[in-house]
Amino acid sequence: MNNITKNQLAAMLLITDAFTLFCFMGKMSLITVLGLSVGIVLQFIMAIPVICLGGEKSKWENWFYLVYLIMWGGLLFRMQWNASKIIYIPYENSGGIWGKLLISELIALVCLYISSTGMKSLARSSLIAAAVGAVCLLVAAISAAADMNWKNLTRADSGRSFLDELLTGFVLSGGLGSFAVLLKMTKGHRLKNSIGYFIGKIVLTAVVTVTAVLVAGGIMKVVDFPVITAAQLSQPFASQRIDSLFLIVFAIFAVFSIAVQMTSAAYIIGELFPSFTKYRSSCSLILMIGAAFLLSKVPPYSTAIAIAVIAAFFAVPLIKLICLKLKGEKLC
Amino acid sequence: MNDNNLKNIKIIPDLKKSIEKIKEISGGSSDVLINEFVSGGVHCALLCCEGMVSTAVITELIFEPITNISAKKDSHELFHYIQEMLLLSNDRPEAYDYDTLFRLLNSGFAVLLADKIDKALAFGVQGYASRSIQEPSGEANIMGAHEGFVETIRTNMSLIRRRLKSPALVMELMVKGEKSRTDLCLCYMQDRVPKRLMEKIRKSLDKIELESILSTGYIRPFVESDNFELFSSTGTTERPDVLCSKLIEGRVALLVDGVPFAIVIPRLFCESFQTLDDYSFKPYYATFIRWIKYGAFVISVLLPAVYAAIVMHHPELLNSTLLMLLVESEKQAPLSIITESIGVLLMYEIIREAGIRLPKPVGGAVSIVSGLIIGDAAVSSGLISTPLLTMTALAVISGFAVPELNPAVTILRFAFLAAGGIFGLFGISLLACAVLANICATEDYGFPYTAPLSPFAKSGMEDTAIRSGMKKMQNRGFTVEEYHE
């Protein structure tokens, strides 16, 4: 089953992490940067049970992860829906609910196609998309240099404590559920593969959040989407707009982050129902759209989401690890 | 008569009846020549196909020795004598049924029948007219050899053998096509090719049940994946030197008789940007040219779409001077930018197709009429804006830098133009994601089309991102097996 490489795994997960950061709603400050970064270190420590188990799952675990991935996919749809309020996606009738609906439909269609091509092609294309995205983000970050104000590091206030930010870190790390599922398919040493991903995640989070605070920190009180606003404010030239570049990255990352959840869910459906060979991806998409409607009333950064992430990523593998230890089976 | 039935009909020992049968099977075709004579006291007939054999060779090497044979006891002794004592040609197969007899006859062999024997002797005396070796028309280069494949499979085999004198080079001949009986030649280096790849290709070829094979396009679908692929995972080349380099890398080649192209299996996306000249020039220049080609590919696919997207939806990306210039030009054009762009691209495709299909002198006239008269008139009359025509021309010319990808590029150009025109950069990004997934899903026999980019292989970058020096590459010992997943 070893289908994907460590670089491809990291690319798929980092795209999801980047997308959730782009869609981050609320205020950001230095505390946010610290909380998210420390949270990632904590996540790495908490990943040890998953790494030990290697992703092998029982039937009930598969059911749990299927529900989780569907919910997280739905949440990503909702994040994209919220962000399209501020992201300028121009076309005839782009405004209003029908415009937003069309944007979501188009993203869903492309995700469905990508998912239908299978996990291998998704992993390969994610690696290229992540490389393109990284270059674009680097250009955006360099372009932001002229608009950075170091005083914003102390000026910006998120209004949340360090512990709150730590929990926000878990809310933004819903992709860790995919990590628990995809680790099984990864070639090579599981611990080394995981270290690579978490280092990438900490660098990505630090660069994006610090840039957002430095650029948009002065107006943080009136900002809803700090990362997107920071990109919109970063204009190195008089007339050229870097937010068009950000629009490209946003669209690509939206597609691939949702496609990762959809393909992982389709894979689990295949594990649960081996005879159900066709329409697995379509089934996942329909369920995710349903989940997006269900979650439309849930606050986007609630503790419940953080608990679900911790359960998927840490509690469930830990319980299984303890059970196996009690049975006297060899672990890790 | 059905060709399959012929396999079951054994050669009739009675010469007269056998000749009657041959005439019946061939329908009395005028080009089947039957010369009856007596050799060694036995009634014989020499059959050949007019225009397929060399008259001089058949007269000197077959007729003269055979008619001078002294008396023999019977036809068995005569055939034994001819086979053992006379070396009439290099290639001397035997036929026991009419299917084999006609296959040999139609391949330029002279076939000897004798009375009271149920087999025929054949002599390879092919002498049909064929095109001489010329410079390839579609893969020209500056520093390399100027020889290209021709339509005759045996000549093509010799072109490869001349460049690869290793005994590890294997050439397996086979016949496919119920009616055309086309010779195919499977070429590979037995010490380099992955065994699994050979097995899978043989299985794929076994599935061919075509009536005729008249070009490489007949076979390629059988050795490619069944999934919808925008880009082909098998390649073609008309250069023997290029094919030899692929064989050394552990790939398999398939030659088709009557076609001056060889199929290469598997093919990678990055190879479309490599030419033999890259290895003749200095590495820094070869690297520069390669990146020019990568850029040309992106421009050829995206330039009209990005132009339409920027002008229609993202004018803020332009500086004020450029914006005013475009506004001024587009203001005079009566059609929308997307209609204009699609119209210009369609016109180009029509002109290109007309230029290819028409006789060369008329084709030149088409170029003059289209380029100078239609193009100039369209701009002067204000029907098409000059910037748009410039962008389209740039995109089209850039496509010529990577000719192998041209069919896919043409379709993608239209698709991206529609996406960019309707949804701006957002549409282009979405379509790019779908295309990227399609390219990454392209895989044949376990070799990903996007290697060495994804899955990433650092060693592969030496001949992808850059072109390393020969001294460095000689120690690499690269085979395509490195990319197998």
Image (cartoon, coloured by chain):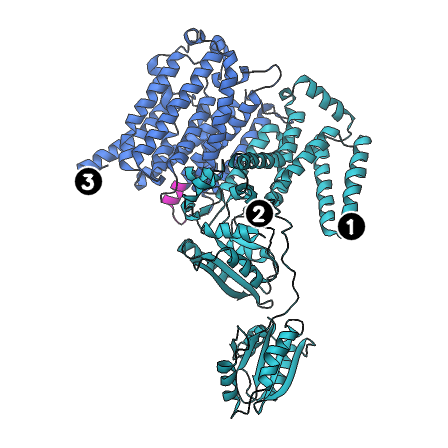
Chain colours: A blue, B cyan
Residue at 50% in and 82% down: B85
Are tags 3 and 1 found on a single chain? Answer: no
**Label annotation for residue B144:** 2
* Left or right of residue A324, residue A196 in this image: right
Front-lying residue, B428 or A242: A242
Q: Tag 2, which secondary structure?
A: loop
* Left or right of residue B375, residue B97 in this image: left
Observer-side mark, 2 or 3, equals 2
Residue B266, given in percent of the width and then of the height, sits at 49, 50
Q: Is residue A269 magenta?
A: yes
Three-letter residue code for mark 2: Gly
Q: Is residue A210 magenta?
A: no
Mark 2–mark 3 CB contact (< 8 Å): no
* Left or right of residue A263, residue B345 in this image: right
Mark 2 belongs to chain: B
CA–CA distance between discs 3 and 1?
A: 82 Å
Identify whether A175 is placed above or below B85. Answer: above
Report whether residue B230 is seen.
no
Give the residue pinned by disc 3: A329
* Left or right of residue A330, residue B383 in this image: right
Front-lying residue, A163 or B357: B357
Residue at 60% in and 57% down: B260
> Overall secondary structure of the magenta stretch?
helix
Give the residue pinned by disc 1: B361
